Image (cartoon, grey):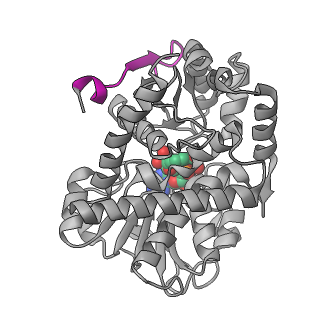
Amino acid sequence: MTAQDSSPLMTLTWTDHVTGRQGHLVVDRLVRGVSSGGLRMRAGCTLDEVTGLARGMTMKEALHYNPEGRYIPLGGAKGGIDCDPQDPGAYGILVRYLRAMRPYIENFWTTGEDLGLTQDVVDRAAAEAGLVSSIQAVYPLLDDEATARRRLADAFAVEVDGIGLDELAGGCGVAESVLATLDRSKRPYAGTRVAVQGLGTMGGATARFLARAGLTIVAVADVKGTIVNPAGLDVEALLAARDAYGTVDRPAALRPADLELPGDAWLSTEAEVLVPAAVSYAIDTVNQARITARWIVEAANMPVLPEAEELLAARGVTVLPDVVVNSGTNAWWWWTLFGDIGADADEAFTYTRRSMRALIDQMLTRAEADGTTPRAAAHAIVADRLPVISERFGWYR
Ligand SMILES: NC(=O)c1ccc[n+]([C@@H]2O[C@H](COP(=O)([O-])OP(=O)(O)OC[C@H]3O[C@@H](n4cnc5c(N)ncnc54)[C@H](O)[C@@H]3O)[C@@H](O)[C@H]2O)c1
Protein backbone atom coordinates (compact mmCIF):
# COMPACT_ATOMS: atom_id res chain seq x y z
CA MET A 1 0.00 0.00 0.00
CA THR A 2 1.34 3.48 -0.82
CA ALA A 3 1.36 6.44 1.60
CA GLN A 4 -1.56 8.00 -0.30
CA ASP A 5 -3.53 4.79 0.11
CA SER A 6 -3.03 4.63 3.86
CA SER A 7 -3.79 8.22 4.91
CA PRO A 8 -7.38 9.44 4.93
CA LEU A 9 -8.63 11.59 2.10
CA MET A 10 -10.20 14.13 4.46
CA THR A 11 -10.20 14.78 8.21
CA LEU A 12 -12.12 17.50 10.00
CA THR A 13 -12.99 18.55 13.52
CA TRP A 14 -16.06 20.67 14.22
CA THR A 15 -16.62 22.75 17.35
CA ASP A 16 -20.19 23.41 18.50
CA HIS A 17 -20.61 27.16 18.90
CA VAL A 18 -23.18 26.66 21.69
CA THR A 19 -21.48 24.11 23.98
CA GLY A 20 -17.88 24.01 22.74
CA ARG A 21 -18.16 20.24 22.28
CA GLN A 22 -16.39 18.69 19.31
CA GLY A 23 -17.32 16.31 16.54
CA HIS A 24 -15.24 14.72 13.80
CA LEU A 25 -15.64 13.49 10.25
CA VAL A 26 -13.05 11.33 8.53
CA VAL A 27 -13.46 10.29 4.91
CA ASP A 28 -10.93 7.52 4.39
CA ARG A 29 -11.55 7.17 0.67
CA LEU A 30 -14.18 7.63 -2.00
CA VAL A 31 -15.34 5.16 -4.63
CA ARG A 32 -17.26 6.77 -7.50
CA GLY A 33 -17.29 9.93 -5.38
CA VAL A 34 -19.14 8.43 -2.39
CA SER A 35 -18.24 7.07 1.06
CA SER A 36 -20.18 5.16 3.71
CA GLY A 37 -19.87 5.12 7.50
CA GLY A 38 -22.04 5.55 10.58
CA LEU A 39 -22.06 8.27 13.19
CA ARG A 40 -21.24 7.50 16.82
CA MET A 41 -21.86 9.59 19.90
CA ARG A 42 -19.98 8.95 23.10
CA ALA A 43 -18.20 11.00 25.74
CA GLY A 44 -14.48 10.97 24.92
CA CYS A 45 -14.80 10.13 21.23
CA THR A 46 -11.50 11.17 19.57
CA LEU A 47 -10.32 11.97 16.07
CA ASP A 48 -7.94 8.97 16.22
CA GLU A 49 -10.85 6.66 17.04
CA VAL A 50 -12.91 8.05 14.13
CA THR A 51 -9.92 7.73 11.79
CA GLY A 52 -9.52 4.03 12.67
CA LEU A 53 -13.25 3.45 12.23
CA ALA A 54 -13.25 5.18 8.81
CA ARG A 55 -10.40 2.93 7.67
CA GLY A 56 -12.38 -0.06 8.88
CA MET A 57 -15.32 1.06 6.75
CA THR A 58 -13.14 1.13 3.63
CA MET A 59 -12.20 -2.46 4.41
CA LYS A 60 -15.79 -3.59 5.04
CA GLU A 61 -16.89 -2.11 1.75
CA ALA A 62 -14.03 -3.80 -0.13
CA LEU A 63 -14.59 -7.18 1.54
CA HIS A 64 -18.16 -7.32 0.26
CA TYR A 65 -17.17 -6.57 -3.32
CA ASN A 66 -18.95 -9.00 -5.58
CA PRO A 67 -18.29 -8.32 -9.28
CA GLU A 68 -21.67 -9.88 -10.12
CA GLY A 69 -23.67 -8.01 -7.45
CA ARG A 70 -25.71 -4.87 -8.01
CA TYR A 71 -24.23 -3.22 -4.95
CA ILE A 72 -20.93 -1.65 -5.81
CA PRO A 73 -18.69 -0.86 -2.86
CA LEU A 74 -18.33 2.73 -1.69
CA GLY A 75 -15.39 4.30 0.10
CA GLY A 76 -15.13 4.31 3.91
CA ALA A 77 -15.89 7.18 6.30
CA LYS A 78 -17.02 7.76 9.89
CA GLY A 79 -18.43 10.51 12.06
CA GLY A 80 -18.05 10.88 15.81
CA ILE A 81 -19.38 13.34 18.39
CA ASP A 82 -17.70 13.70 21.77
CA CYS A 83 -20.80 13.78 23.98
CA ASP A 84 -22.69 11.35 26.23
CA PRO A 85 -25.80 10.39 24.21
CA GLN A 86 -27.85 10.62 27.43
CA ASP A 87 -26.75 14.24 28.07
CA PRO A 88 -29.84 16.49 27.97
CA GLY A 89 -28.16 18.65 25.30
CA ALA A 90 -27.11 15.68 23.12
CA TYR A 91 -29.91 15.93 20.56
CA GLY A 92 -29.33 19.65 19.93
CA ILE A 93 -25.61 19.00 19.43
CA LEU A 94 -26.44 16.20 16.98
CA VAL A 95 -28.68 18.49 14.93
CA ARG A 96 -26.05 21.25 14.84
CA TYR A 97 -23.34 18.73 13.89
CA LEU A 98 -25.50 17.42 11.03
CA ARG A 99 -26.27 20.97 9.91
CA ALA A 100 -22.53 21.69 9.78
CA MET A 101 -21.90 18.43 7.89
CA ARG A 102 -24.71 19.08 5.42
CA PRO A 103 -22.50 19.82 2.40
CA TYR A 104 -20.61 16.55 2.94
CA ILE A 105 -23.73 14.45 3.57
CA GLU A 106 -25.45 15.97 0.54
CA ASN A 107 -22.51 15.21 -1.71
CA PHE A 108 -20.28 12.37 -0.58
CA TRP A 109 -20.84 10.99 2.96
CA THR A 110 -23.65 8.49 3.55
CA THR A 111 -24.19 7.84 7.24
CA GLY A 112 -26.40 6.08 9.76
CA GLU A 113 -26.57 4.86 13.33
CA ASP A 114 -23.64 3.65 15.35
CA LEU A 115 -22.77 3.42 19.04
CA GLY A 116 -24.92 5.78 21.11
CA LEU A 117 -27.40 6.63 18.32
CA THR A 118 -30.32 4.79 16.77
CA GLN A 119 -31.38 5.21 13.15
CA ASP A 120 -34.65 6.84 14.28
CA VAL A 121 -32.73 9.56 16.08
CA VAL A 122 -30.31 10.07 13.17
CA ASP A 123 -33.25 10.32 10.74
CA ARG A 124 -35.15 12.81 12.92
CA ALA A 125 -32.08 14.99 13.46
CA ALA A 126 -31.14 14.80 9.75
CA ALA A 127 -34.60 16.05 8.76
CA GLU A 128 -34.33 18.87 11.29
CA ALA A 129 -30.91 19.76 9.85
CA GLY A 130 -32.54 20.16 6.41
CA LEU A 131 -31.30 16.93 4.84
CA VAL A 132 -33.37 14.77 2.49
CA SER A 133 -31.84 11.65 4.03
CA SER A 134 -28.62 10.58 5.77
CA ILE A 135 -27.72 8.53 2.67
CA GLN A 136 -28.75 10.95 -0.06
CA ALA A 137 -25.23 11.14 -1.56
CA VAL A 138 -25.66 7.64 -2.96
CA TYR A 139 -28.93 8.41 -4.79
CA PRO A 140 -27.25 9.58 -8.01
CA LEU A 141 -25.64 6.11 -8.29
CA LEU A 142 -29.02 4.33 -8.34
CA ASP A 143 -30.73 3.20 -11.55
CA ASP A 144 -34.26 3.76 -10.24
CA GLU A 145 -34.04 6.03 -7.23
CA ALA A 146 -37.74 6.05 -6.30
CA THR A 147 -38.05 2.24 -6.29
CA ALA A 148 -34.78 1.81 -4.42
CA ARG A 149 -35.78 4.30 -1.72
CA ARG A 150 -39.17 2.66 -1.33
CA ARG A 151 -37.53 -0.77 -0.99
CA LEU A 152 -35.22 0.47 1.76
CA ALA A 153 -38.05 2.26 3.59
CA ASP A 154 -40.15 -0.93 3.38
CA ALA A 155 -37.21 -2.95 4.74
CA PHE A 156 -36.90 -0.57 7.69
CA ALA A 157 -40.57 -1.15 8.47
CA VAL A 158 -40.06 -4.94 8.78
CA GLU A 159 -39.99 -6.25 12.36
CA VAL A 160 -39.19 -9.71 13.62
CA ASP A 161 -40.49 -10.52 17.11
CA GLY A 162 -40.40 -6.90 18.24
CA ILE A 163 -37.04 -5.86 16.73
CA GLY A 164 -36.61 -3.97 13.44
CA LEU A 165 -34.87 -5.72 10.55
CA ASP A 166 -32.31 -2.89 10.39
CA GLU A 167 -31.34 -3.69 14.00
CA LEU A 168 -31.11 -7.42 13.28
CA ALA A 169 -29.09 -7.66 10.07
CA GLY A 170 -25.73 -6.82 11.71
CA GLY A 171 -26.20 -9.27 14.58
CA CYS A 172 -27.31 -11.96 12.12
CA GLY A 173 -23.90 -11.50 10.46
CA VAL A 174 -22.03 -11.61 13.78
CA ALA A 175 -23.87 -14.77 14.85
CA GLU A 176 -23.19 -16.44 11.50
CA SER A 177 -19.49 -15.63 11.93
CA VAL A 178 -19.57 -17.50 15.24
CA LEU A 179 -21.46 -20.46 13.77
CA ALA A 180 -19.18 -20.72 10.72
CA THR A 181 -16.14 -20.71 12.99
CA LEU A 182 -17.61 -23.41 15.26
CA ASP A 183 -18.45 -25.51 12.18
CA ARG A 184 -14.86 -25.28 10.94
CA SER A 185 -13.69 -26.47 14.38
CA LYS A 186 -16.36 -29.19 14.42
CA ARG A 187 -17.67 -27.87 17.73
CA PRO A 188 -21.39 -28.42 18.41
CA TYR A 189 -23.57 -25.39 19.11
CA ALA A 190 -25.26 -27.01 22.09
CA GLY A 191 -23.04 -26.59 25.14
CA THR A 192 -21.10 -23.67 23.62
CA ARG A 193 -21.22 -20.75 26.05
CA VAL A 194 -21.19 -17.10 25.04
CA ALA A 195 -20.58 -13.84 26.96
CA VAL A 196 -21.60 -10.57 25.31
CA GLN A 197 -20.57 -7.01 26.19
CA GLY A 198 -23.33 -4.62 25.10
CA LEU A 199 -27.00 -5.44 24.59
CA GLY A 200 -27.81 -2.62 22.15
CA THR A 201 -28.35 -3.01 18.41
CA MET A 202 -25.39 -5.31 17.74
CA GLY A 203 -25.11 -7.20 21.03
CA GLY A 204 -28.87 -7.68 21.35
CA ALA A 205 -29.34 -9.13 17.89
CA THR A 206 -26.23 -11.31 18.17
CA ALA A 207 -27.45 -12.74 21.47
CA ARG A 208 -30.86 -13.49 19.94
CA PHE A 209 -29.47 -15.31 16.87
CA LEU A 210 -26.95 -17.32 18.91
CA ALA A 211 -29.52 -18.33 21.53
CA ARG A 212 -31.90 -19.39 18.75
CA ALA A 213 -29.10 -21.46 17.16
CA GLY A 214 -28.79 -23.42 20.42
CA LEU A 215 -25.83 -21.75 22.12
CA THR A 216 -26.03 -20.74 25.79
CA ILE A 217 -25.72 -17.04 26.57
CA VAL A 218 -24.14 -17.06 30.04
CA ALA A 219 -23.35 -13.33 30.48
CA VAL A 220 -24.39 -9.98 29.07
CA ALA A 221 -22.99 -6.62 30.11
CA ASP A 222 -24.50 -3.22 29.58
CA VAL A 223 -23.49 0.20 30.85
CA LYS A 224 -24.85 -0.70 34.35
CA GLY A 225 -22.94 -3.97 34.85
CA THR A 226 -22.86 -7.67 33.95
CA ILE A 227 -25.77 -10.11 34.28
CA VAL A 228 -24.62 -13.72 34.62
CA ASN A 229 -26.23 -17.13 34.73
CA PRO A 230 -24.01 -20.19 34.06
CA ALA A 231 -27.14 -22.19 33.13
CA GLY A 232 -28.12 -19.62 30.51
CA LEU A 233 -29.93 -16.26 30.51
CA ASP A 234 -33.42 -15.67 29.14
CA VAL A 235 -32.27 -13.55 26.20
CA GLU A 236 -35.73 -12.58 24.94
CA ALA A 237 -36.74 -11.34 28.42
CA LEU A 238 -33.58 -9.19 28.57
CA LEU A 239 -34.18 -7.83 25.05
CA ALA A 240 -37.76 -6.92 25.90
CA ALA A 241 -36.59 -5.04 29.03
CA ARG A 242 -34.11 -2.72 27.24
CA ASP A 243 -34.50 1.05 27.03
CA ALA A 244 -33.62 3.06 23.91
CA TYR A 245 -29.92 3.02 24.89
CA GLY A 246 -29.67 -0.76 25.35
CA THR A 247 -29.81 -0.68 29.17
CA VAL A 248 -31.69 -3.60 30.75
CA ASP A 249 -34.36 -2.86 33.38
CA ARG A 250 -33.15 -5.37 36.00
CA PRO A 251 -36.27 -5.70 38.17
CA ALA A 252 -38.38 -6.33 35.04
CA ALA A 253 -36.21 -9.05 33.51
CA LEU A 254 -33.97 -10.83 36.00
CA ARG A 255 -34.87 -14.26 37.33
CA PRO A 256 -33.83 -15.43 40.84
CA ALA A 257 -30.83 -17.39 39.52
CA ASP A 258 -29.46 -14.47 37.48
CA LEU A 259 -26.55 -12.71 39.19
CA GLU A 260 -25.56 -9.06 38.94
CA LEU A 261 -21.79 -8.59 38.77
CA PRO A 262 -19.52 -5.60 38.02
CA GLY A 263 -19.18 -4.15 34.51
CA ASP A 264 -16.02 -6.03 33.50
CA ALA A 265 -17.15 -9.48 34.77
CA TRP A 266 -18.27 -10.55 31.26
CA LEU A 267 -14.61 -10.71 30.25
CA SER A 268 -13.62 -13.45 32.67
CA THR A 269 -16.88 -15.42 32.54
CA GLU A 270 -16.35 -19.09 31.74
CA ALA A 271 -17.36 -19.23 28.08
CA GLU A 272 -15.97 -20.47 24.79
CA VAL A 273 -16.95 -17.33 22.87
CA LEU A 274 -16.68 -13.67 23.90
CA VAL A 275 -18.56 -11.10 21.86
CA PRO A 276 -17.51 -7.52 22.63
CA ALA A 277 -20.43 -5.52 21.18
CA ALA A 278 -20.17 -2.16 22.93
CA VAL A 279 -17.20 0.20 23.07
CA SER A 280 -13.85 0.41 21.27
CA TYR A 281 -10.69 -0.51 23.23
CA ALA A 282 -12.55 -2.80 25.69
CA ILE A 283 -9.79 -5.44 25.78
CA ASP A 284 -6.29 -4.22 26.62
CA THR A 285 -2.95 -5.78 27.53
CA VAL A 286 -3.87 -5.98 31.22
CA ASN A 287 -7.43 -7.32 31.20
CA GLN A 288 -6.75 -9.79 28.35
CA ALA A 289 -4.99 -11.99 30.94
CA ARG A 290 -8.39 -12.71 32.54
CA ILE A 291 -9.87 -14.15 29.34
CA THR A 292 -10.30 -17.92 29.20
CA ALA A 293 -12.47 -18.06 26.05
CA ARG A 294 -11.23 -19.75 22.86
CA TRP A 295 -12.64 -17.13 20.46
CA ILE A 296 -13.25 -13.38 20.61
CA VAL A 297 -15.70 -12.24 17.97
CA GLU A 298 -15.59 -8.48 17.40
CA ALA A 299 -19.16 -7.23 16.97
CA ALA A 300 -18.01 -3.79 18.15
CA ASN A 301 -15.50 -1.75 16.20
CA MET A 302 -11.92 -1.93 17.48
CA PRO A 303 -12.73 -3.57 20.85
CA VAL A 304 -9.37 -5.41 21.07
CA LEU A 305 -6.19 -3.32 21.17
CA PRO A 306 -3.45 -4.62 18.79
CA GLU A 307 -0.96 -5.33 21.62
CA ALA A 308 -3.64 -7.30 23.48
CA GLU A 309 -4.39 -9.32 20.35
CA GLU A 310 -0.72 -10.33 20.10
CA LEU A 311 -0.76 -11.62 23.68
CA LEU A 312 -4.06 -13.44 23.08
CA ALA A 313 -2.80 -15.04 19.85
CA ALA A 314 0.32 -16.25 21.67
CA ARG A 315 -1.86 -18.24 24.08
CA GLY A 316 -4.18 -19.64 21.45
CA VAL A 317 -7.12 -17.21 21.68
CA THR A 318 -8.36 -16.37 18.19
CA VAL A 319 -9.78 -12.92 17.47
CA LEU A 320 -12.22 -12.70 14.57
CA PRO A 321 -11.87 -9.11 13.37
CA ASP A 322 -14.52 -6.38 13.27
CA VAL A 323 -13.97 -5.58 9.59
CA VAL A 324 -15.42 -8.96 8.69
CA VAL A 325 -17.62 -9.87 11.66
CA ASN A 326 -19.73 -6.71 11.95
CA SER A 327 -19.82 -5.81 8.26
CA GLY A 328 -23.35 -7.19 7.82
CA THR A 329 -25.26 -4.04 8.77
CA ASN A 330 -23.56 -1.79 6.26
CA ALA A 331 -23.78 -4.43 3.52
CA TRP A 332 -27.50 -5.05 4.25
CA TRP A 333 -28.33 -1.36 3.67
CA TRP A 334 -26.63 -1.47 0.27
CA TRP A 335 -27.86 -4.92 -0.78
CA THR A 336 -31.36 -3.65 -0.08
CA LEU A 337 -31.00 -0.21 -1.68
CA PHE A 338 -29.21 -1.47 -4.80
CA GLY A 339 -31.70 -4.34 -5.14
CA ASP A 340 -29.67 -7.49 -4.46
CA ILE A 341 -32.38 -8.35 -1.91
CA GLY A 342 -35.94 -7.24 -1.24
CA ALA A 343 -37.64 -5.85 1.89
CA ASP A 344 -38.01 -9.27 3.45
CA ALA A 345 -36.49 -10.65 6.65
CA ASP A 346 -35.99 -14.24 5.45
CA GLU A 347 -34.34 -13.09 2.24
CA ALA A 348 -32.13 -10.67 4.17
CA PHE A 349 -31.05 -13.28 6.73
CA THR A 350 -30.38 -15.93 4.05
CA TYR A 351 -28.28 -13.54 1.97
CA THR A 352 -26.44 -12.20 5.03
CA ARG A 353 -25.68 -15.71 6.31
CA ARG A 354 -24.39 -16.88 2.93
CA SER A 355 -22.18 -13.83 2.46
CA MET A 356 -20.79 -13.85 5.99
CA ARG A 357 -20.05 -17.57 5.92
CA ALA A 358 -18.21 -17.18 2.62
CA LEU A 359 -16.17 -14.28 4.02
CA ILE A 360 -15.28 -16.12 7.24
CA ASP A 361 -14.22 -19.20 5.28
CA GLN A 362 -12.14 -17.12 2.89
CA MET A 363 -10.46 -15.27 5.76
CA LEU A 364 -9.71 -18.35 7.85
CA THR A 365 -8.43 -20.29 4.83
CA ARG A 366 -6.12 -17.40 3.96
CA ALA A 367 -4.95 -17.13 7.60
CA GLU A 368 -4.08 -20.83 7.60
CA ALA A 369 -2.30 -20.60 4.26
CA ASP A 370 -0.29 -17.50 5.24
CA GLY A 371 0.27 -18.56 8.86
CA THR A 372 -1.20 -15.27 10.13
CA THR A 373 -4.02 -14.06 12.34
CA PRO A 374 -7.50 -13.79 10.80
CA ARG A 375 -7.17 -9.99 11.01
CA ALA A 376 -3.93 -10.02 8.99
CA ALA A 377 -5.64 -12.31 6.47
CA ALA A 378 -8.63 -9.94 6.17
CA HIS A 379 -6.25 -7.02 5.61
CA ALA A 380 -4.40 -9.02 2.95
CA ILE A 381 -7.68 -9.72 1.13
CA VAL A 382 -8.53 -6.00 1.26
CA ALA A 383 -5.07 -5.04 -0.03
CA ASP A 384 -5.66 -7.31 -3.03
CA ARG A 385 -9.14 -5.85 -3.67
CA LEU A 386 -8.71 -2.10 -3.27
CA PRO A 387 -6.65 -1.62 -6.44
CA VAL A 388 -9.18 -3.71 -8.39
CA ILE A 389 -12.02 -1.51 -7.11
CA SER A 390 -10.20 1.77 -7.84
CA GLU A 391 -9.26 0.51 -11.28
CA ARG A 392 -12.86 -0.41 -12.12
CA PHE A 393 -14.79 2.45 -10.50
CA GLY A 394 -12.33 5.29 -9.77
CA TRP A 395 -12.20 7.54 -6.69
CA TYR A 396 -14.24 10.41 -8.06
CA ARG A 397 -17.47 10.61 -10.03
N1 LIG B 1 -25.33 -0.31 15.05
C1 LIG B 1 -24.70 -0.71 13.98
O1 LIG B 1 -25.28 -0.72 12.91
C2 LIG B 1 -23.28 -1.14 14.03
C3 LIG B 1 -22.71 -1.76 12.90
C4 LIG B 1 -21.40 -2.21 12.96
C5 LIG B 1 -20.68 -2.03 14.13
N2 LIG B 1 -21.24 -1.42 15.21
C6 LIG B 1 -20.41 -1.29 16.41
O2 LIG B 1 -20.98 -2.07 17.45
C7 LIG B 1 -20.75 -1.44 18.71
C8 LIG B 1 -22.08 -1.25 19.41
O3 LIG B 1 -22.92 -0.43 18.60
P1 LIG B 1 -24.50 -0.43 18.81
O4 LIG B 1 -25.06 0.36 17.69
O5 LIG B 1 -24.97 -1.79 19.10
O6 LIG B 1 -24.59 0.47 20.13
P2 LIG B 1 -25.87 0.73 21.03
O7 LIG B 1 -25.73 2.14 21.47
O8 LIG B 1 -27.12 0.27 20.37
O9 LIG B 1 -25.63 -0.24 22.28
C9 LIG B 1 -24.48 -0.16 23.08
C10 LIG B 1 -24.60 -1.17 24.20
O10 LIG B 1 -23.34 -1.19 24.91
C11 LIG B 1 -23.58 -0.92 26.28
N3 LIG B 1 -22.41 -0.23 26.80
C12 LIG B 1 -22.01 1.03 26.52
N4 LIG B 1 -20.88 1.30 27.19
C13 LIG B 1 -20.57 0.18 27.89
C14 LIG B 1 -19.52 -0.17 28.76
N5 LIG B 1 -18.55 0.69 29.04
N6 LIG B 1 -19.52 -1.42 29.30
C15 LIG B 1 -20.50 -2.30 29.00
N7 LIG B 1 -21.51 -2.03 28.17
C16 LIG B 1 -21.54 -0.80 27.63
C17 LIG B 1 -24.85 -0.13 26.34
O11 LIG B 1 -25.46 -0.21 27.63
C18 LIG B 1 -25.66 -0.83 25.24
O12 LIG B 1 -26.21 -2.03 25.75
C19 LIG B 1 -20.01 -0.14 18.40
O13 LIG B 1 -18.62 -0.39 18.52
C20 LIG B 1 -20.36 0.13 16.97
O14 LIG B 1 -19.35 0.88 16.31
C21 LIG B 1 -22.53 -0.99 15.18
The residue depicted at 53 percent of the width and 23 percent of the height is 34
Q: Quadrant of residue 209?
A: bottom right
Q: Quadrant of residue 5?
A: top left
The residue depicted at 67 percent of the width and 60 percent of the height is 349
The residue depicted at 52 percent of the width and 58 percent of the height is 356
Counting every numbered tag in the picture gives: 0
Residue 244 drawn at (x, y percent): 67, 49
State whether residue 224 appears in this view: no
User: Magenta stretch containing residue 7, yes or no?
Assistant: yes
Please say if 262 is above or below 396. Answer: below
Residue 193 drawn at (x, y percent): 47, 80
Please say if 31 is above or below 362. Answer: above
**Residue interval drawn in magenta:** 3-22
Residue 384 drawn at (x, y percent): 33, 42
Image side of residue 288 versus residue 34, left or right? left
Q: Quarter holding the N terminus?
A: top left
- Residues 364 and 153: in front is 364
